[in-house]
Amino acid sequence: MPSIKNFWGSEHDRQYHYDERIRREKIANYGYQKVPEDEKTQWVLRHFNSVARQYDLMNTLLSFGIHYLWKRTAIGTLGLEPGDLVLDVCGGTGDLAILAKRAVGASGEVVVYDINRAMIDAGRFKKTNADDRNRIRYVQGNAEQIAFPDEHFDAVMVGFGIRNVTHMEQGFREMLRVLKPGGRMMCLEFSKPSNPVFCRLYDFYSFTIMPLLGQLLAGTRQAYTHLPESIRLFPLPDELKTILERIGYTQVSWRRLTNGIAVIHTGKKQDR
């Protein structure tokens, strides 16, 4: 575990998100804990089962509502058009999917794809934006083995979920596989603030306030301790760009949001 003075993992720590290292050592990150490779999925499932009912409320409270702006900005980078087919990997309660559905219209289709049934149901049966939710398809499945054929979607996205996939690179490979040639990929994920003073304030908030609110409002301190830990061990933006290019995405770029608390990565599948 990183010292109190440095919550952010080293490059060595972040490499436990790399498939080659996980498969070689049979160990994966679950926050600051090291867990057996074949057990991480169950740890993640238990985590989201415990927060599913309060997930959207907690996101809004903990981010002061700014996550909605991040998601709108992220959807805008995909350049969605009416009639597009869109896959929302690790789609959870469907915030990104709702925005995508509005962009693709009645002639388009958006699929929420998530391994956790509790998260899918928490979004699917939510009363707000009910009409939009009823127009979205929901599929339960593992991001490492996406249950759709090759070259099926015009766009694929993942928001705040890829760091929980045991074999992250395999998840991105599957996303690339189901993209049509010329299709677009977007990844929205938390990252390290670029301003050192802001970063220290963010660390205090993350490791003091967030777990306390998690305990008071969601009944789980552990889940909201794991969240900031997992963020601090995820590859930094330039490292993730390198990974995406190695996998085969082209035109990869990234953009910081809110001093780097969140980052949008975009890429394309090579056109024929």
Image (spheres, helix red, strand yellow):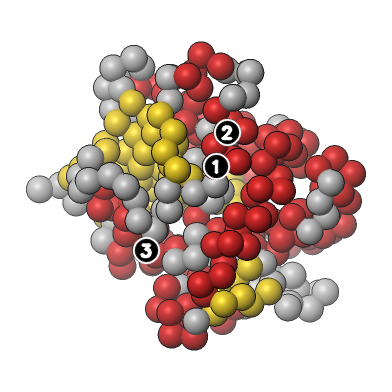
Residue 160: in sight, yes or no? yes
Q: Nearer the viewer, mark 3 or mark 1?
A: 1
Q: CA distance from mark 2 to mark 3?
A: 26 Å
Q: Amino acid at mark 2?
A: Asp
Which residue bears the numbered disc 3?
Answer: 170
Q: Is residue 257 left or right of residue 173?
A: right
For the residue carrying disc 2, how many other residues have a C-alpha within 10 Å: few (<14), some (14-19), or many (20+)? Answer: some
The structure residue drawn at horizontal position 10% and vertical position 48%, both measured from the top left corner, is 272
Label disc, if present, on residue 121 of the rendered structure: 2
Q: Is residue 125 left or right of residue 228?
A: left
137 in relation to 59, above or below? above
Q: Position of residue 152 (x, y in %)?
A: 23, 40
Please state which of residues 123 and 208 is positioned toward the viewer in this rendering: 123
Q: CA distance from mark 1 to mark 2?
A: 6 Å
Q: Amino acid at mark 3?
A: Gln
Q: Position of residue 134 (x, y in %)?
A: 47, 19
For the residue carrying disc 1, how many other residues have a C-alpha within 10 Å: few (<14), some (14-19), or many (20+)? Answer: some
Q: Position of residue 85 (x, y in %)?
A: 29, 31
Q: Earlier in the sequence, mark 2 or mark 3?
A: 2
Q: Position of residue 67 (x, y in %)?
A: 64, 37
Which residue bears the numbered disc 1?
Answer: 117
The structure residue drawn at horizontal position 53% and vertical position 33%, both measured from the top left corner, is 94
